[in-house]
Image: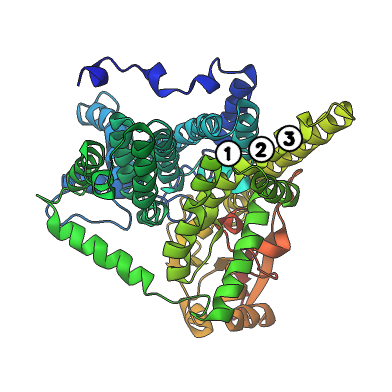
């Protein structure tokens, strides 16, 4: 107990990581800037939702707070991030209740959205720092710097680090758990066992799929502890490696936190409903069939997604780093133990689900970044020959990665819907009726039009009967989801005539448009296709 009391923050930081190099601070600043640009994407929102898919909305958090996250409260996602957001909402709620700030509901909703997204920005930046710490423990300082830079400079990371989705928060807790797992395997301190269990539970209680990252960790820890005990003590058994103060401390910590976070005492019904919800989703439609051919196709889809996330040059470097690490397994044994979490996640989550999206592979690419960092470090310092050319190539590599990830920010800031909204304000009268087709967050915002209706998938006859003066839709989605409807609208100009077809052309856009768009040869399944959609507006013709 005295050891725990006297423990300081520096005791938890690897000596290899200190002193922190200036390059690390530059990487963190770069990551923070990339993450915060475009944080107001789709805000303020007249509805309760932003433009990002699957965000935790302020309304859902406030509803949870009103129910005290008890008495049957449930949500699509586990409760931990709802608690985190509610803690940061509380000061604003208190000021509003006391009439110290008197904001309209729409503006208050925007404030809460910005708070939620700022938390993602912060967690994303700290995550990059934690990747550096992990890298220092399993490789070296130089490789760790490269790994953190690879992690920071990917389009999905930059995108999710500025939305209130649960992806960055659960990855944050996962990397924290990974750090303490590495420390367990190196030192076997009881406190690291407890912190690992806590961080692992936090990750799972932020996004359910995180469980698959930790399926193998109990076996990894027990085997490592057995070997550790065998090296330090004359007599040891497998039973002692399974049941001991360290493992029991971790078990008690993890179990207690799980019960507390899910509020099983006061919200058991809510937990049951959430469990039914996620198991029902797991039984949903598979994209890939559950046979050899289906799993082969899904594995190839994984390769394509990782290539998209990292960019082709960095993806190749990570693969080369993995092959190089195979030649020196004895020097970096922990690197391959960490790698085991990737196939564990794939086998116990992705292959079970039968669906494979870009966001599912975020923890996998972070694990691969350690191999990429090792490869670049070796490339630069294996010999002094062609030193200038080597450094130039690495600089060009990361300039390309920075431009690739910056594309997300540029596209968000120049989203087509901003211009479309201005056009609507200038050309559509307030008393004219508008029919929006599709989900709210895939469309331009309704800025004060009182005769606006939303319909998800109407028939053409429904559109005609609505007698709307204008119809507005996201052509990417309507063309792919309801092609018959799209063709009828296009072909029947006597009823509705196209008056605006707009998609912005940002000055920087390195994303492979034809691979991510619904109306193209969509081979990459990502939410990044929701940025900057083509919007079409049709006007009802007189006499029709």
Q: CA distance from mark 1 to mark 3?
A: 13 Å
Residue 160 placement, left or right of 404: left
Residue designated by label 1: 332
Q: Secondary structure at mark 3?
A: helix
Q: Is residue 398 above or below residue 502?
A: above
Residue at horizontal 27 percent and vertical 46 percent from the top = 237
Q: Quadrant of the C terminus?
A: bottom right
Q: Residues within 10 Å of mark 2 (few under 14, many from 20)?
A: many
Residue designated by label 3: 378
Q: Earlier in the sequence, mark 1 or mark 3?
A: 1
Whether residue 5 can be seen here: yes
Which of 406 and 336 lies nearest the eye of the viewer?
336
The x, y position of residue 220, in whole percent, is: 40, 48
Q: Which mark is residue 62?
A: none
Q: Quadrant of the N terminus?
A: top left
Which of 240 and 93 lies nearest the eye of the viewer?
240
Q: Contact (CB < 8 A) between labels 1 and 2?
A: yes
Looking at the image, is mark 1 or mark 3 nearer the viewer? 1
Residue at horizontal 55 percent and vertical 74 percent from the top = 295
Q: Secondary structure at mark 2?
A: helix
Residue designated by label 2: 374
Q: Secondary structure at mark 1?
A: loop
The x, y position of residue 200, in whole percent, is: 34, 44
């Amino acid at each position: 107990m005295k050891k725990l009391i006297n423990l300081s923050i520096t005791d938890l930081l690897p000596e290899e990581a200190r002193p922190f190099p200036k390059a690390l601070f530059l990487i963190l600043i770069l990551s923070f800037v990339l993450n915060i640009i475009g944080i107001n994407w789709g805000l303020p929102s007249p509805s309760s939702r932003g433009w990002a898919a699957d965000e935790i909305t302020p309304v859902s958090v406030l509803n949870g707070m009103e129910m005290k996250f008890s008495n049957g409260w449930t949500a699509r996602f586990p409760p931990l991030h709802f608690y985190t957001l509610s803690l940061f909402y509380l000061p604003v709620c208190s000021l509003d209740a006391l009439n110290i700030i008197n904001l309209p509901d729409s503006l208050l909703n925007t404030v809460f959205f910005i708070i939620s997204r700022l938390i993602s920005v912060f967690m994303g930046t700290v995550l990059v720092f934690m990747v550096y710490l992990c890298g220092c423990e399993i490789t070296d300082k130089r490789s760790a710097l490269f790994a953190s830079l690879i992690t920071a400079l990917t389009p999905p990371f930059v995108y999710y680090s500025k939305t209130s989705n649960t992806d960055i928060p659960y990855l944050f807790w996962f990397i924290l758990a990974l750090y303490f797992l590495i420390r367990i395997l190196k030192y076997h301190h009881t406190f690291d066992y407890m912190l690992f269990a806590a961080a692992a539970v936090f990750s799972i209680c932020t996004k359910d799929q995180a469980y698959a990252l930790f399926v193998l960790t109990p076996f990894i820890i027990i085997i490592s502890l057995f070997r550790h005990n065998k090296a330090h003590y004359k007599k040891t058994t497998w039973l002692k490696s399974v049941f001991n103060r360290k493992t029991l401390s971790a078990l008690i910590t993890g179990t207690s936190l799980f019960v507390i976070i899910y509020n099983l005492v006061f919200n058991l019904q809510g937990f049951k409903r959430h469990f039914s919800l996620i198991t029902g989703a797991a039984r949903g439609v598979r994209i890939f069939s559950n046979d050899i051919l289906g799993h082969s196709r899904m594995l190839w889809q994984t390769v394509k997604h990782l290539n998209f996330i990292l960019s082709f040059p960095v993806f190749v470097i990570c693969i080369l780093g993995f092959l190089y690490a195979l030649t020196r397994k004895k020097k970096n044994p922990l690197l391959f133990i960490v790698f085991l979490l990737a196939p564990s996640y794939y086998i116990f989550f992705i292959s079970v689900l039968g669906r494979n999206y870009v966001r599912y592979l975020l923890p996998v690419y972070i694990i691969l970044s350690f191999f990429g960092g090792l490869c670049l470090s070796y490339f630069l310092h294996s010999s002094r020959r062609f030193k200038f050319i080597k450094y130039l190539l690495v600089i060009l590599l990361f300039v390309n990665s920075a431009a690739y990830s910056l594309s997300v920010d540029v596209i968000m800031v120049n989203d087509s819907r901003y211009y479309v909204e201005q056009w609507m304000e200038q050309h559509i009268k307030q008393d004219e009726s508008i029919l929006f087709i599709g989900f709210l967050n895939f469309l331009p915002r309704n800025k004060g039009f009182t005769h606006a209706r939303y319909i998800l998938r109407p028939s053409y006859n429904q559109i005609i009967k609505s007698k709307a003066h204008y119809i507005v839709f996201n052509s990417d989605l309507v063309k792919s989801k309801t092609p018959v409807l799209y063709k009828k609208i296009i072909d029947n100009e006597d009823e509705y005539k196209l008056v605006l077809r707009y998609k912005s052309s940002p000055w920087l856009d390195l994303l492979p448009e034809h691979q991510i768009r619904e109306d193209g040869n969509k081979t990459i399944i990502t939410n990044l296709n929701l940025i900057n959609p083509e919007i079409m507006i049709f006007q009802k013709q007189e006499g029709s």
